[in-house]
Image (tube, rainbow, N blue to C red):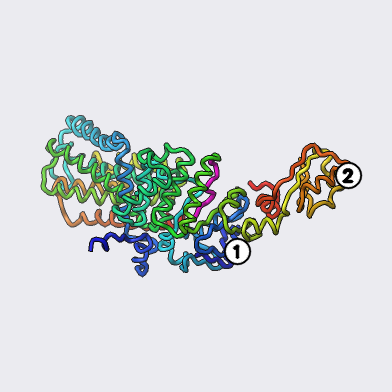
Amino acid sequence: MSMINLAVDSAVAIAERRRNRPGRSIYSGRARVALERNFMAFRSSNWIIVLSGFVEPLFYLLAFGFGIGKLIGGVTDGDGHPVQYAAYIAPALLATSAMNGAIYDSTWNVFFKMHFAKLYETMLATSLGPLDVAIGEIGWALLRGLIYAIGFMAVMAPLGLIPSWWALMAIPGAVLIAFGFASFGMAITSYLKTFHQMNWINFFMLPMFLFSGTFYPLSIYPQWIQSIIQAMPLWHAIQLERAFMLGNVSWGLLVHVLYFAVMIIAGLIFTTRRLTALFIK
Amino acid sequence: MIIARGLTKVYGDFTAVDGIDFEVRKGEAFGLLGPNGAGKSTTMKMIASVSKRTGGELTILGLDPNKRGPEIRAHLGVVPQQDNLDRELKVHENLFSYGRFFGLSRKFLKNKVEELLEFAQLTEKRNSKAEELSGGMKRRLTIARGLVNEPEILMLDEPTTGLDPQARHILWDRLFRLKEQGVTLVITTHYMDEAEQLCDRLIVMDKGKIMAEGSPADLIKRYASKEVLEVRFGSSKNQEVAEQISHLGHRTEVLPDRILIYSENGEEDLQAILKMGLEPVTSLVRRSSLEDVFLRLTGRTLVE
């Protein structure tokens, strides 16, 4: 028996297995191998750089939440309940953590792998398809976003910033947010060709972070500015996480979930199309 | 193994490959020769099923690459012109992760990676980062990586470009071994000695078309003479002398620095020149090579 089991599947047999499946030319069902590759590379990479992305929102929490927060005292949340200022901005910073983690890997790292390391070209010369690569890479970026979010939560708990059990929902919320940003980030990056264009991403990210209702309610702005901000992904992310963390859960949150679902799907479609156009033309 | 009929690739209004026919048989080493821009790499990409043809027929192992890309790619080993090793991974991880891309099991790869490290003479370098390797080592690792899925066809795009002579010879030796094991090789090169050494049969391409096809010896016989006599009279006198000696050999060619006489017996022609009272500054009789065939077919104009 065991002798027979020793016979291994050849690469051809593995590829043949899917020959009658729809979409086999774009997906081989092996997105996980891209994750494995990233994990291998990560083991020997610089942990300090990874850590820095996590520390950034933490500094904001300390400076604004507990520094400026002392001057402000409290604010009222969306439902009119008074909350401590730090507790008000903490969920926004949590959403930002998830976003940052996802964006780091899905933009600059993807750009490097695509144009300099030629990694996707190499992968697509094997029996992998572009959707495998897209899911694998986006999945990896998502993971980093999730880890940042969990780390941030772990800091918030002892600071007394988690008043509700609903807060646990902020973790799946962070997955959704990170997935959306990773997917969208990779799609955009795959269309960009120069460093100059890449810098536009950063140019866009900073104001989005500062003005998406992160540090104060949106009602401060005139209506037309509010409308612009409400179209931005980070605003939806912050609304979702703030509602979970402060326990103001309602069906209305589904709007934000839907927003991210669209972002995820659109990102996957465009990334796959772009990889196909670039490397399997 | 590979059959192409009227194979064409058009990019916009540029025709990179213009209706070529060829066949590659099992176990042979097949060469694609041509100057830069001849369409070799485009042809390789179409065979590797990462570029779709725009006209004609192409079947690889009986399958159509436009429809069965992933299955065909599982049969192939690809060694691109530029080493695209994973710079973030170690040597052995490069082989392992590439095998995983094909869906091969960890258990299988554990042994396979050791076997390939041995083959590429990189066992001692297994824990180095890929970017720390020398040019020759990188190329050997890229070839080993292309073998991880035990391909029936190994595609090599200019395998020895940029390597020093020692590294080239080691590489040729490795490729010979693969051939002995029955792996079909498809090689592009513009080194004539490499084509003569490695290829059983080859096509010479220029501007997307096939100029000639045959074994290296065949092509030399058909498009060049047995020997070549090279004589130099000084750049100012070459043209004048060439007219006097144009009756010698099959064909003469005047270059700025020397005259080439394609003939059956170079030594005899040299004696004839001396008898005419002409005294060349230097003279050389050599066997004609694939290089002469190549230059005859594709011209001497520099292609950038």
- Residue annotated with mark 1: B20
The quadrant where residue A17 appears: bottom left
Amino acid at circle 2? Met
Amino acid at circle 1? Ile
Bounds of the magenta segment: B155-163
Dot 2: chain letter: B
**x, y percent for residue A205:** 34, 42
In reply to whether residue B74 is colored magenta, the answer given is: no
Are labels 1 and 2 assigned to the same chain? yes
Closer to viewer: mark 1 or mark 2: 2
**x, y percent for residue A14:** 34, 62
Dot 1: chain letter: B
**x, y percent for residue B73:** 43, 59
> Where A11 falls versus A234 (above or below)?
below
Q: Residues within 10 Å of mark 2 (few under 14, many from 20)?
A: few
Q: CA distance from mark 1 to mark 2?
A: 47 Å
Tell me whether the residue at label 1 lies in contact with that at label 2, contact meaning CB atoms closer than 8 angstroms: no
Tag on residue B120? Answer: none
Q: Secondary structure at mark 2?
A: loop
- Residue annotated with mark 2: B276
**x, y percent for residue A262:** 31, 57
Q: Residues within 10 Å of mark 1 (few under 14, many from 20)?
A: some
Whether residue A92 is visible here, answered yes or no, is no
Q: Is residue A266 left or right of residue A168?
A: right
Q: Is residue A125 left or right of residue B11?
A: left
Q: Can you say which quadrant of the picture contains the N terminus of chain A?
A: bottom left
Whether residue A244 is visible here, answered yes or no, is yes
